[in-house]
Amino acid sequence: MPPERIADGFRAVGNMLAPVYLFQGDATVLLDAGMSFTAPFIFQQLEELLGIPPALEWVYITHLHYDHCGGIPYFKRRIPSLKAGGSEYAAELIKREKVVNLLTRLNEEVALQARENYGISLPSDIQFEPFSFSRTIKEGDIIDTGRFHIRVLDVPGHTKCSVAYFVEELEALSAGEAVGVPFLTGEVQPEFLSSYDAYLHSLYRMRDLQPRFICLAHGGVISDKKAREYMNESIRATEAFREKVEKLLRRYGDEKRVVEIIAAEEYTPQKTTQPRTPYMLNLEAKVRVISRMMNETAAQDLS
Ligand SMILES: [Zn+2]
């Protein structure tokens, strides 16, 4: 699939199951970097668009998950001048050995699965390695590419390190899973891994921006009416998922059991192509978040 031109200077690059977003101004900026095994394909498209080596100055990530930062080491090895940006907390996290180990493990596991399931050949030089951030960004910062002004919003809730990018001139929003991920059926899968309240609050803030384009973490770009509906649906789906988890927790009282029940229903080939390990890690985190909220409420009621 060739890189898709969304608007002048704005493209979705890579496979739309895990795309990255390119904004070409005086400085050229990539938002998110995909996984380590998708990096060669993305890089090839960048070479076609931006020359050899690609004239790419910056890559900014929405958050430090394996499928958003996994490609950075590969890109950096080929473009030594490439600079990475992300939230301050993301820059802290990448210094932790445990975090690097998890990012490495997930990138490897998913690459091997892609080879097994889709026959994708894996080059030998796609290994993940820690990288450093040249710039940390926070709420209100502007990334000035000359042509585009990209405003940063702190949008915690998916992770503590999540930020969103709003390209003012295009009204384009890139926020990773902070806006939810569409299942293959079209329903939105909420992704509040670190905090339900923060996630919902972040969603309301992003909806109020009324983005014309939403650069989805997985699934490509949606625009106009679909983008508006998506933000509302994302809020509804978040609230509905919380209610569902609460009901199941009340009934079974056991996080593990609830995770199994939801996974049996959600994790089907008709609904998702997400690899199983990250899917399960995410679901466990979401159930834990709701369980913790219920325990806190119960503790308050007793005090
Ligand atoms: Zn994520």
Image (tube, helix red, strand yellow):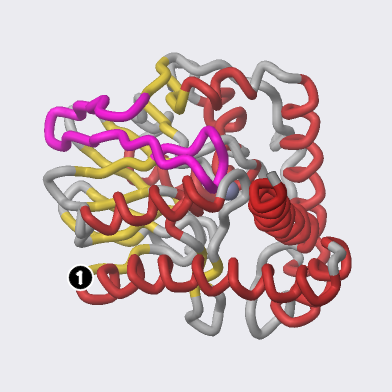
Q: Quadrant of residue 224?
A: bottom left
Identify the image quadrant of the N terminus: bottom left
User: Taking 245 as reference, is 59 above or below it?
Assistant: above
Q: Looking at numbered disc 1 in the image, what kind of residue is underneath it?
A: Asp
Residue 95 as seen in the image, left or right of residue 229 = right
Q: Callout 1: 10 Å neighbours few (<14), some, many (20+)?
A: few
User: Taking 98 as reference, is 284 above or below it?
Assistant: below
Spot the residue most to the front.
303
Whether residue 221 is visible, yes or no, is yes
Residue drawn where x is 40% and y is 16% of the image: 135
Residue drawn where x is 46% and y is 26% of the image: 87
Identify the image quadrant of the C terminus: top right
- How many marks can you see? 1
Q: Where is mark 1, residue-wise?
A: 224
Which type of secondary structure does the marked residue at label 1 adopt? Answer: helix
Whether residue 278 is visible, yes or no, is no
Residue 266 as seen in the image, left or right of residue 65 = right
